[in-house]
Image (tube, rainbow, N blue to C red):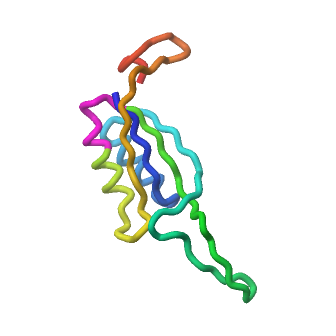
Amino acid sequence: MQKIEAIIKPFKIDDVKEALHAIGVQGMTATEVKGFGRQKGHTEVYRGAEYVVDFLPKVKLEIVVTNDKVEEAISAITTAADTGKIGDGKIFITALADVVRIRTGERGEEAI
């Protein structure tokens, strides 16, 4: 089992959700986050005053998949979240030792 964490632009969440649903991913967790990478924020003007926005709004998705679905899930996320512009995001993949479903006590892939 692998945990996929994807940081994407907020307006792409529905596209990514649909792409993952299409390949059989049943669940995910989404969190609104703020951050910056190479773009290091941007400058905005409000009522004539210029100010720097360091942390940009993003969405962090957390998805747990079986080992055989990892590459398919990564492909679905990258295709759906890509705008071709800087700040599209990152994907992090981590191996999971175990998963437990609280309600039933199921463990491992049965708990996904």
What residue sits 56% from the left and 75% below the top? 42
Vertical side of 104 occupied by 37: above or below = below
Secondary structure mostly seen in the magenta stretch: helix
Residues 2 and 26: in front is 2
Furthest-top residue in this view = 105
50 vs 63: above or below: below
Identify the residue at image location x=60%, y=68%: 54
Residue 62: x, y in percent? Answer: 47, 40
Question: Looking at the rendering, which quadrant does residue 25 occupy?
Answer: top left
What is the tally of numbered marks visible in this picture?
0
**In screen coordinates, is 106 left or right of 58?**
left
The stretch of residues the image draws in magenta is 65-73
| Residue 54 magenta | no
Question: Is residue 51 positioned above or below 102 on the image?
Answer: below
- Relative to 45, 29 lies left or right: left
Q: Residue furthest bottom?
A: 48
Q: Residue at x 44, y 12 (%)?
A: 106
**Residue at left 34%, top 27%?**
1
Q: Position of residue 24 (x, y in %)?
A: 33, 35
**Quarter of the figure that contains the C terminus:** top left
Where 37 sits versus 20, above or below?
Answer: below
On the image, the x and y values in percent for residue 17 come to 43, 47
Does 70 lie within the magenta span?
Answer: yes
